[in-house]
Image: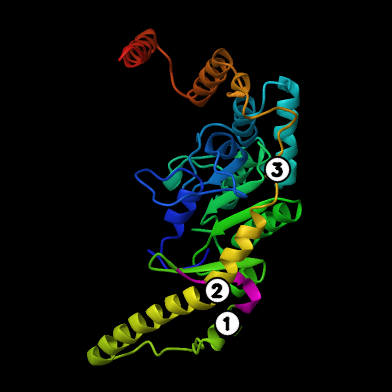
Amino acid sequence: MLGPSGSGKTTLLTALAGRLTGKVTGTITYNGNSDSSYIKRKIGFVSQDDVVYPHLTVLETLTYTALLRLPKTLTRGEKIEHAERIITELGLTRCRNSPVGGCMGLFRGISGGERKRMSIGQEMLVNPSLLLLDEPTSGLDSTTAQLIVSVLKGLARSGRTIVTTIHQPSSRLYRMFDKVVVLSDGNPIYSGNAGRVMDYLGSVGFVPGIVADVKHDDEIEKHDQDQASVKQSLISSYKKNLYPALKEDIQQNNTEPLVFPSRGTSGRSSENQWNTSWCEQFKVLLKRGLQERRHESFSGLKIFQVLSVSILSGLL
């Protein structure tokens, strides 16, 4: 998904992932199926901001994620082995025992590109059929950004669907995309093959060109008016030329059966609603919390305060 800031890329992606708060109009379906409870468990979502524990290593972070999210039919050793396999697949072997690090340089850790790949790895652990990423190259240099997109391209070739938002990609990155959706003020103006965008724009009478940076005030006002009219014309052209064929293609694809990797378990079964039991989740989270705070000094008073607040919060 391409578009300038404020075009609606993140909002649309978050809505597709089922993580958009507030009222959403319309219907979101996956291959014609709208069963959100099971399908959302088979979707990976990587937000723009990496939410991680800074003092845990890469291996520890992925291991705890595997213990929490992988099905209980797998043994602990198999879950850890799966985390190790993801580390190798994403090229994180060199930094597997390095701490993740905090934001804004408060605690030094792995690089931004390695942190982003680790965030992708956390979602890859559940083997999602659909992986959604919100601006995975944001804040990265061109070489690291190309590495991230190359990793995503490899994941797509392995049989997964990768949907990502990206802001001002370089020509090298753009050539890696198969299909693009171009947004403007919340409206699509193109959807289709990445290599045919320029041909389509030319066919509707708009050939992108170089605009001078220096303008007078009256020229700026005229440019803004022209920009608004061009934008509206592109939106109308999309609805007339692309939308009917796209809608027909989606309806045809919706007749195909919905298939997600289930690892031999049924996601509709109530007994398999959660991958791990409550007690197992509690033990894993407790150990992770203690390991994250291993650099801090513990005292009886601190432990009493935390337990008291936890009990009161649970009762309320």
- In the rendered structure, which disc, 2 or 3, sits on the residue that comes first in sequence? 2
Evaluate whether residue 142 shows in this view: no
Give yes or no for contact between labels 2 and 3 (Cβ–Cβ under 8 Å): no
- Amino acid type at circle 3 is Val
Which quarter of the figure has residue 271? top right
Residue ID at (35%, 83%): 229
Residue ID at (63%, 78%): 196
Rendered location of residue 17, percent (x, y): 51, 46
Q: Which residues are magenta?
A: 188-196
Rendered location of residue 41, percent (x, y): 58, 36
Which residue is the extreme one toward the left? 217
| Left or right of 49, for residue 178 | right
Q: Main secondary structure of the magenta part?
A: strand
Q: Which residue is mark 3?
A: 259
**Up-down: is 179 above or below 30?**
below
Front: mark 2 or 1: 2
Rendered location of residue 9, percent (x, y): 46, 60
Report the Cα–Cα distance between label 1 and label 3. Answer: 33 Å
Q: Which residue is mark 2?
A: 242
Front: mark 1 or 3: 3
Which quarter of the figure has residue 136? bottom right
Report the Cα–Cα distance between label 2 and label 3. Answer: 28 Å
Q: Which mark is residue 200?
A: 1
Rendered location of residue 11, percent (x, y): 42, 54
Q: Secondary structure at mark 1?
A: helix
Give yes or no for contact between labels 2 and 1 (Cβ–Cβ under 8 Å): yes
**Up-down: is 16 above or below 314?**
below
Q: Which mark is residue 233?
A: none
Report the Cα–Cα distance between label 2 and label 1. Answer: 10 Å
Residue ID at (57%, 46%): 115
Q: Secondary structure at mark 2?
A: helix
